[in-house]
Image: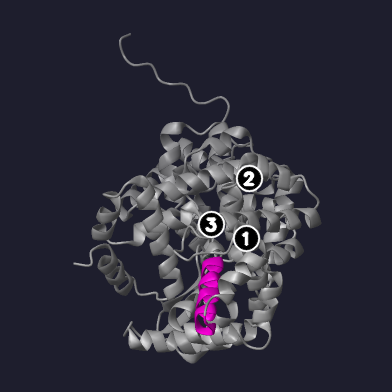
Amino acid sequence: MNSKPEQPESQSGEIEFSSFDELSAYLDGELDEKQTQEVENRLGSDSKYLAELQSLQKTWDLLDTLPVQEPGGSFTKTTMELIVGDAVNTAKNRRKRTLFLGRVAIMILLPVVFFATAYGVVRRLKSDPDRRLIENLSVIENFSKYEVVDCDLEFLERIRNIDFFQKPTVIVVNGSEMEVAYEDDIADSIPIDSVQRAEYVKALDVEKKISLKGKFEDFEVKSESDRKRYIDFDLELQARGNRQQLRSTLNGFYDWLTELELSERSGLQDLPQNERLAEIRAIRVRQAQNELGKKSLVNLPSKEDVPFLMGWCESIFQLKERQLRDRFPLVLEQAMRQKKIGSVPPTSVLLEKSRVENLNSIIGFLLREDRQFVEDLIFEGDALFGLYDILSLNARKQLDSRSEAEQRSRILDWVDAVNQSQQGTSLEDLKKFEMELSSKVRDRLQKMSSEKYRETLEWMYEESRKSQISSQSWWEQQIEKTLDPN
């Protein structure tokens, strides 16, 4: 009477949870040799245990024939560990299960359970969000950026013509070769192979996993037509020969847009594309006018002259772009040799950098390293007369009171100030730059007032971009000399 009553066998044919994990691990090839032998011995002597195995295998086979169902909200509430936990083993496990069938075929003698159990269904469906995450990783990372250009590549190409948005490039060592790379180029670093892609996700740090999880959840709640639109745009963008430049422009434009006031963002998104592009340019001009003079000690002409000065600079540099790009690789190579900074890249890499670098970055570098060339280029032909024609009477009087050499120097200072005002710096850019600095330099910055701290950090960031030097150790030496000249 006191003996423990026997548990009745399942009337529904469901797999017992106590055996599920063990059999699942066996099918997945996760048991060691001793554990595997124990399971196989039990399969040969325990008909109920064998029936559970048959039911589990039947569950997988049946699920393979079912249409893919849209996931419920619960599937997007999982942690990143659940989302990507089994992704790497998916392909391997399927092959292992196929091999296993040959090993146990002689034992499949009893009737199989007719339908899948609830536990098996839940286990299998949990892999569906995982599959969508891995397959659409590039889209999930970037779809919020695709939205701001309406998934329209031609509109993105037109934004690329606003030089401000494309971020500067860097020269990096890739194995035994050097190549030009773009900042924040996440999409091109995502592997194509699904197993490698899953490994890539698993290797992300906690902060990036949490960010990816949030993006995935946002992607999942989009309509099917929107998700398809993002996927099609991503494929079209990847097929473009200049996709790196376009992605760099997209990243810069997205960063700029997110830092605008909410009212400005809303106003832009409500405009037709042509009007939106015109308004984007107008906002950029206003921002540059506000920045003009803040980053330079140059005495600028009166406020009424500033828009005309900026327009003149833009037209001059567009007209002289070919000469600027031709000069840039020669001066960059010379600067790297003189400063003895690592290995000098081959000519092909320097030419590629000159071809794809944004023009403002090239101008800033040449103004720093080869000012005479820029001066001669600007005053070639009748360019100076063009500037005189658009300046106010007061500004012309200021120039007329100086010698020709002083006039040229003053105008070049104005040009430098205008160019610096065009160099956009997002908070994200500053944070990334700061984290790359040594602890010694960061300590010096943190001792400053908040206003001085931001001002100095921006100056350092802009100077590093103008230097075009990728050696962090060299650049930090220059910073330390500036911060602590003694």
Q: Earlier in the sequence, mark 1 or mark 3?
A: 1
| Circle nearer the viewer, 1 or 2 | 1
Local packing at callout 1 (Cα closer than 10 Å; few below 14, some 14-19, many 20+) is many
Q: Is residue 285 left or right of residue 470?
A: right
Label 1 residue SS: helix
Mark 1 and mark 2 in contact? Answer it, CB < 8 Å: no
At horizontal 52% and vertical 26% (from top left) the residue drawn is 10
Query: Label 2 belongs to which residue?
Result: 219
Quarter holding the C terminus is: bottom left
Outermost top residue: 1
Residue 277 location, quadrant:
bottom right
Residue 52 locus on image (x, y percent): 50, 38
Given residues 48 and 178, the one toward you in this image is 178
Local packing at callout 3 (Cα closer than 10 Å; few below 14, some 14-19, many 20+) is some
Mark 1 and mark 3 in contact? Answer it, CB < 8 Å: no
Q: Is residue 54 magenta?
A: no
Local packing at callout 2 (Cα closer than 10 Å; few below 14, some 14-19, many 20+) is many
Q: Is residue 418 visible?
A: yes
**Which residues fall within the magenta stretch?**
403-419
Query: Label 3 belongs to which residue?
Result: 291
Q: CA distance from mark 2 to mark 3?
A: 37 Å
Query: Label 1 belongs to which residue?
Result: 250
Q: Is residue 411 magenta?
A: yes
Task: Say if 180 sits above or below 260 in the image.
Answer: below
Residue 449 locus on image (x, y percent): 32, 46
At horizontal 62% and vertical 71% (from top left) the residue drawn is 396
Q: Is residue 277 left or right of residue 41?
A: right
Q: Earlier in the sequence, mark 1 or mark 2?
A: 2
Magenta stretch: helix, strand or loop mostly: helix
Residue 3 locus on image (x, y percent): 31, 14
